């Protein structure tokens, strides 16, 4: 019974942006400068023209709700917002956030774009720097995520 209830709650809290975001993958790409993550984002698209804006949106979304890993680099980060449930709980905030505010938290690394045709779709990959400290601070001030200090 608990499992069914949990599944129903999870289905209701599915990511708000599922219709707006393209299918993407995120992994660690090395060490970013202090206060940032360096991630590699691969967007799967029917067109080879994927904008930096789409890649950046996926990078910020991935850092917030998916987390990322890279076994070769022994790198693993949990989602900054905790889980996808937070996205459902703060639906209005994240709808507005992903309309305009997210652009302040990412920068696509110049010269890192790769486009590979895979069957009927393209895999467009870029390295992206995400300002994790500023993102965490701003989400905490908005009351969306708890600060790290609440544990101590």
Image (cartoon, rainbow, N blue to C red):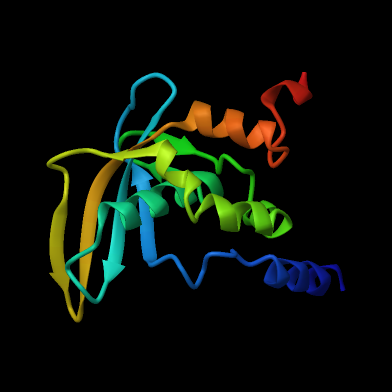
Residue lying furthest bottom: 120
Residue ID at (57%, 54%): 96
Query: Looking at the picture, does residue 149 appear above or below residue 74?
Result: above
Q: Position of residue 25 (x, y in %)?
A: 37, 57
User: Based on the displayed image, in which of its 4 quarters is residue 22 positioned?
Assistant: bottom left
Quadrant where the N terminus is found in the figure: bottom right
Q: Position of residue 122 (x, y in %)?
A: 20, 70
In the displayed structure, does residue 2 sit left or right of residue 26?
Answer: right
Q: Nearer the viewer, residue 59 or 143?
A: 143
Query: Looking at the picture, does residue 34 appear above or below residue 66?
Result: above
Residue ID at (53%, 64%): 17
Q: Position of residue 60 (x, y in %)?
A: 45, 46
In the displayed structure, does residue 115 sit left or right of residue 41?
Answer: left
Q: Position of residue 123 (x, y in %)?
A: 22, 64
Quadrant where the C terminus is found in the figure: top right
Q: How many marks?
A: 0
User: Based on the displayed image, in which of its 4 quarters is residue 137 positioned?
Assistant: top right
User: Based on the displayed image, in which of its 4 quarters is residue 124 positioned?
Assistant: bottom left
Query: Looking at the picture, does residue 25 appear above or below residue 10?
Result: above
Residue ID at (29%, 57%): 42
Q: Nearer the viewer, residue 101 or 139?
A: 101
Q: Nearer the viewer, residue 44 or 137?
A: 137
Query: Looking at the picture, does residue 96 appear above or below residue 105?
Result: below
């Amino acid at each position: 019974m608990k499992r069914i209830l949990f599944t129903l709650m999870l289905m209701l809290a599915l990511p708000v942006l599922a219709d707006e975001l393209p299918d993407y993958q995120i992994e660690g790409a090395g060490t970013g400068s202090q206060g940032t993550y360096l991630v590699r984002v691969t967007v799967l698209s029917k067109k080879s023209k994927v904008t930096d804006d789409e890649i950046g949106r996926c990078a910020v979304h991935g850092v917030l709700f998916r987390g990322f890993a890279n076994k070769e680099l022994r790198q693993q980060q949990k989602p900054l917002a905790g889980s996808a449930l937070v996205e459902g709980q703060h639906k209005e905030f994240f709808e507005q956030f992903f309309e305009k505010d997210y652009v302040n938290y990412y920068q696509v690394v110049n010269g890192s774009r790769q486009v590979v045709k895979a069957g009927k779709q393209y895999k467009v990959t870029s390295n992206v720097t995400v300002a994790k400290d500023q993102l965490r601070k701003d989400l905490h001030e908005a009351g969306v995520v708890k600060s790290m200090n609440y544990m101590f």
